[in-house]
Amino acid sequence: RAKYPVIDFCEDNLVACTLDLFFAGTETTSTTIRWALLFMAMYPELQARVQAEIDAVIGQSRQPALEDRNNMPYTNAVIHEVQRKGNIIPFNALRLTVKDTVLAGFHVPKHSHCSWRRTFCFPSLKAIAKSLLFASRSCTLYQMIKTISTGWAGALLGLQHSTVNE
């Protein structure tokens, strides 16, 4: 305090921020593991292939290291797919675009933010996709955006298709 007398330090705020960081990481990690276990149980051939890659790259005699990641493309892809298909974070932190952007052929104006009205970005594509009766969870982001932009949701969100190349 002697060095920075004008800084107003609040221990309660420090504790709250620390707990936010701890619980946010704990929840997403445990949710990812639960989804991974479910998918591995549903698809034993996937589990066998991941295990084979782990055994080939890491073996049984040592712990995995970060450097192993580059040598395990299948396992890395499975982890990313678990996070994509599983509902890890249904409502994430708000985001803001820092410049005009074109995504999948759609113009996203600078300073668009995550909300349900008049913006490009929204908390959960999966929530909207369910309400629009998507037949498959394997639908790509581009297909979702294209479908949403042509219906009532596109009008509500203010999506415009851009002719600019992606």
Image (tube, helix red, strand yellow):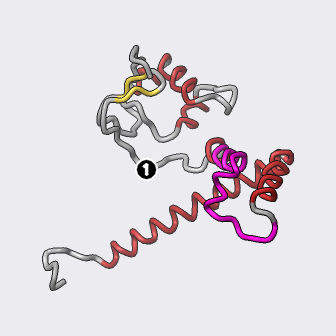
Within the image, what quadrant is residue 26 found in? Answer: bottom right
Q: Residue at x 64, y 26 (%)?
A: 134
Between 124 and 152, which is closer to the camera in this rendering?
A: 124
Q: Does the magenta-highlighted stretch encompass residue 153?
A: no
Q: Quadrant of the C terminus?
A: top left
**x then y, percent, for residue 34:** 70, 56
Q: Residue at x 64, y 56 (%)?
A: 31
Q: Residue at x 56, y 26 (%)?
A: 144
**x then y, percent, for residue 93:** 43, 50
Question: Is 121 placed above or below 36 here?
Answer: above
Question: Is 9 placed above or below 166 here?
Answer: below
64 relative to 102 in the view: left or right: right
Q: Which residue is mark 1?
A: 93
Question: Is 59 placed above or below 74 here?
Answer: below
- Dot 1: element: loop
Between 27 and 47, which is closer to the camera in this rendering?
A: 47
Q: Amino acid at mark 1?
A: Ala
